[in-house]
Amino acid sequence: QEHLVESGGGSVQAGDSVRLSCTGSEGRFWSNYAMGWFRRAPGKDREFVAGINYNDKDIEYQDSVKGRFIISRDDTKNTVFLQMNNLQPEDTAVYYCAADIRGLWALTSSLPDYWGQGTQVTVSS
């Protein structure tokens, strides 16, 4: 069973924008979960990108995406979004959605409870 399903990836040019979506499956109160995004670039380890707590107020970003990426959530649709602006070739990666009932601290410091399958984002110069 896929608990989290991402969509919105693709191939774009440097400077373009892309919005990723991640929807949680029915049967869970995803509004109680911290949700976020990770990415794995070719040849590199998976890294945290952005996270938003269940209260919709606590938000964290990796330094390299601050000012360019915006994370948000719509709990009426069990969905978290990642708006990525001014994309650069170094943003090329598989982007994974993740969720953790323990909160944002767990999302950023340990292995989250749930993961999506990932969606590819490729940025050409």
Image (cartoon, rainbow, N blue to C red):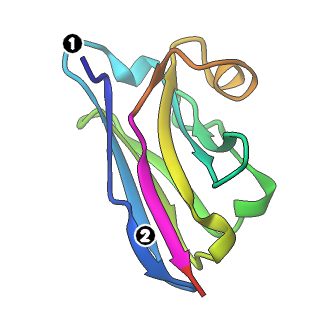
Q: Position of residue 97 (x, y in %)?
A: 47, 37
Disc 2 marks a residue whose amino acid type is Val
User: Left of 17 or right of it: where is 106?
Assistant: right
> Is residue 84 rendered magenta in the image?
no
Q: Which residue is mark 1?
A: 27
Mark 2 vs mark 1: in front: 2
The front one of 9 and 44 is 44
Q: Which residue is mark 2?
A: 18
Q: State the residue at coordinates (58%, 20%).
A: 112
Q: State the residue at coordinates (59%, 79%).
A: 86
Query: What is the quadrant of the C terminus in the image?
Result: bottom right
Does residue 97 sit above or below 64 in this rendering?
above
Q: Position of residue 85 (x, y in %)?
A: 55, 74
Disc 1 marks a residue whose amino acid type is Gly
Q: Of helix, strand and loop, which mostly describes the magenta segment?
A: strand
Magenta segment: 117-123
Query: What is the quadrant of the N terminus in the image?
Result: top left
Q: Position of residue 92 (x, y in %)?
A: 58, 65
Gap in angstroms between the C-alphas marked 2 and 1: 29 Å
Q: Position of residue 60 (x, y in %)?
A: 70, 43
